[in-house]
Amino acid sequence: MAQFHFLQGNINHCARAQDLLLQSMAEWSIHVAVVAEPYFIPTRDNWLGCADGLVAIIGETLIDPSRGRGWVAAVSGGIVIVGVYFSPNKSLADFEGFLVELGAVVGRYHPRPVLVLGDLNAKSSAWGSPVTDPRGEVLEEWTVTTGLVVLNRGSEYTCVRQRGGSIVDVSFASPSVASRVRDWRVAVEVETLSDHRYIRFDVSAQTASGRHPTTPINDGPRWALKRIDRELLEEAALVQSWIWESTTDGPVDVEAVALWFRGAMTQICDASMPRVRQRSAKRQVYWWTAEIAQLRIACVAARRRYTRYRRRRRRDSAEEDALYEVYRASKETLRLAIGDSKSRAREELLGSLDRDPWGRPYRWIRGKLRPWAPPLTQRMQPQLLESVLSTLFP
């Protein structure tokens, strides 16, 4: 893996916004996402929530977890990810106490590379805000004390409401990982069904020498060694040796020989064992449809018309409100469509149990039994386990 793809957002406890977040993760092949104010935190291996359910980390390989009130931390791909959220309704003294605890968390993982991502409801010009409030000043000082670097670039609002916007979603990193961050940006072109926008960035993988690769590594084709036919392997190798002897006459070029040898080895492997088919990344969630994709495009178009009008010097309040109502109606249509699609997909899944118990439901359950985690059946209640098995295997 040459790069790790990160996603950061706040979904304001909205169910459909959480659904759309999962689709965005699948569509963009996101490895790790930090979600502030999730709708709910599922009890799954790839979800890790804080003690009060205000922030969560989503990723396939989360190890060495720890959590507290308003923060959760885990290690993925050798990087420590700390998700944070702090309410705007709490006092400045509470905020300072929270940062003391958060600083201890960052220090606990030292010297590993650290990312601190989330919504702290603090404004500062250091991360593009037009104003700096008391919280922003305290957070600036905390950042310097802990040795972190601000990743935010530009002055694009991360939170947009009808009457204004702000930059309260921030990304911090230790210097060792900040130098590997690529293409940090606010995803203004995507609808989130929340008043917060997504933040996306990539982190290049670190090699054993400590340097990160500048281009992705292509490992070439792979073969299923367990299914090798040794007799066919020997026969194919003999055929290639005969071809070489019959076509070679006189001096040869080293590069030409290397190229021929590579082609010969490929043909020998193809003759004696099947190739391993590369699995493409999952591009959509189970309920996603072309209709919902078009509704999301229409929603983005309505939002663009509204935001462009708001940038005009001379505006008519009635026309502005009308454009906002169109945008709000588009969001509501998208929410309803997602809810209906999920309901239909769930009914279809349950209905297929009787028709084909070894089909999609069985494959879905098998996919949840990840080899790097303890078997799911060991953690299920006996009554629930018996119910699931009797349904899947009548």
Image (tube, grey):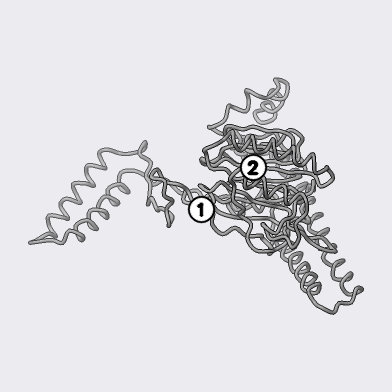
Q: In the picture provided, is 9 more to the left or to the right than 280?
A: right
Q: Which mark is residue 179?
A: 1
Mark 2 secondary-structure assignment:
strand
Q: Residue at x 14, y 60 (%)?
A: 247
Q: Position of residue 160 (x, y in %)?
A: 78, 60
Q: Is residue 11 visible?
A: no
**Camera-nearest residue between 367 and 360:** 367
Q: In the picture provided, is 225 more to the left or to the right than 120?
A: left
Q: Residue at x 59, y 36 (%)?
A: 107
Q: Earlier in the sequence, mark 1 or mark 2?
A: 2
| Location of mark 2 (residue) | 58
Which amino acid type corresponds to the residue marked 1 in the rendered image?
Ser
Q: Position of residue 220 (x, y in %)?
A: 37, 52
**Camera-nearest residue between 364 and 309:** 309
Name the image quarter holding residue 55.
Answer: top right
**Camera-nearest residue between 360 and 67:** 67
Q: Position of residue 4 (x, y in %)?
A: 53, 49
Task: Give the crowd class for mark 1: few <14, some 14-19, many >=20 residues within 10 Å.
Answer: few
